[in-house]
Image (tube, rainbow, N blue to C red):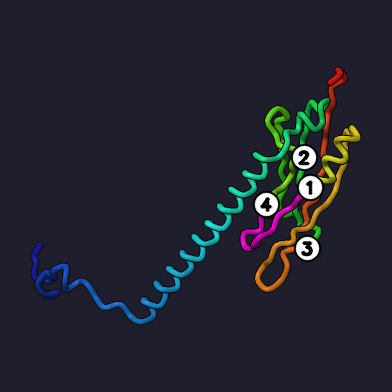
């Protein structure tokens, strides 16, 4: 095997020769990528601040075990829907630890682009628990902003509660 065909390619190039100028399109796409990254960080920061505020409200709220003394078990089955749709976006179950839980039922909106939204089920859930209802359901609508309009995501919940028979 000879090396003649390889010599036709010319001498080996150094690293500096391999570098090339970036086109204006490549510079613009890098700038757009950096702006998108900064916007994402801003959203994450806003979400982090909202979560910190919500946790502070939870810490300041009275404890569920003191508000509903005979409550033994509590589960919330949560379904989320887009406005005007019957297609389920998300479903999950929240199992509440009665001994540590606040008497507050606020949940953030799971729409990534929603700003300042969420759901507050506290009044309805606490009213039903004080009446010792074992199963009840309700619905709430997100009031956050999504672009130029409202988010409007719908949260439907079913609550399953069990109570102890012993005196408080």
Residue on which disc 1 sits: 121
Q: Calculate the distance from the C-alpha at mark 3 to the C-alpha at mark 1.
A: 18 Å
Q: Earlier in the sequence, mark 2 or mark 3?
A: 2
Residue on which disc 3 sits: 83
**Measured from the top left, where is residue 72 in percent x and y?**
79, 26
Residue on which disc 4 sits: 108
Identify the residue at horizontal 71%, vertical 40% (top origin): 61
Q: Are marks 2 and 1 in contact (CB under 8 Å)?
A: yes
Magenta region, main secondary structure: loop
Image quadrant in which the N terminus is located = bottom left
Q: Calculate the distance from the C-alpha at mark 4 to the C-alpha at mark 1.
A: 11 Å
Question: Residue 97 sits in which quadrant?
Answer: top right
Question: Residue 32 sits in which quadrant?
Answer: bottom left
Packing grade of label 4 (10 A; few <14, some 14-19, many >=20) is some
**Measured from the top left, where is residue 102 in percent x and y?**
71, 37
Residue on which disc 2 sits: 76
Element at label 4: strand
Q: Earlier in the sequence, mark 3 or mark 1?
A: 3
Element at label 2: strand
Q: Give the answer, above or below, for where 99 lies relative to 127.
A: above
Relative horizontal placement of residue 66, taking residue 28 as reference (left or right): right
Packing grade of label 3 (10 A; few <14, some 14-19, many >=20) is some
Q: Is residue 57 magenta?
A: no
Q: Which numbered tag is attached to residue 24?
A: none
């Amino acid at each position: 095997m000879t090396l003649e065909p390889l010599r036709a390619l010319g001498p080996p190039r150094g690293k500096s020769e391999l570098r090339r100028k970036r086109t204006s399109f490549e510079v613009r796409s890098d700038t757009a990528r950096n702006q998108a990254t900064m916007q994402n960080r801003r959203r994450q920061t806003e979400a982090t601040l909202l979560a910190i505020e919500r946790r502070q409200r939870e810490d300041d709220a009275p404890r569920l075990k003191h508000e509903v003394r005979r409550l033994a078990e509590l589960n919330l089955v949560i379904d989320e829907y887009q406005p005007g749709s019957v297609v389920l976006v998300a479903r999950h179950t929240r199992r509440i630890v009665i001994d540590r839980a606040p008497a507050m039922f606020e949940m953030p909106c799971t729409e990534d682009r929603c700003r300042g939204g969420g759901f507050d089920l506290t009044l309805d859930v606490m009213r039903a628990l004080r009446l010792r209802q074992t199963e009840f359901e309700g619905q709430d609508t997100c009031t956050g902003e999504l672009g130029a309009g409202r988010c409007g995501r719908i949260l439907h919940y079913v609550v399953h509660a069990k109570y102890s028979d012993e005196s408080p």
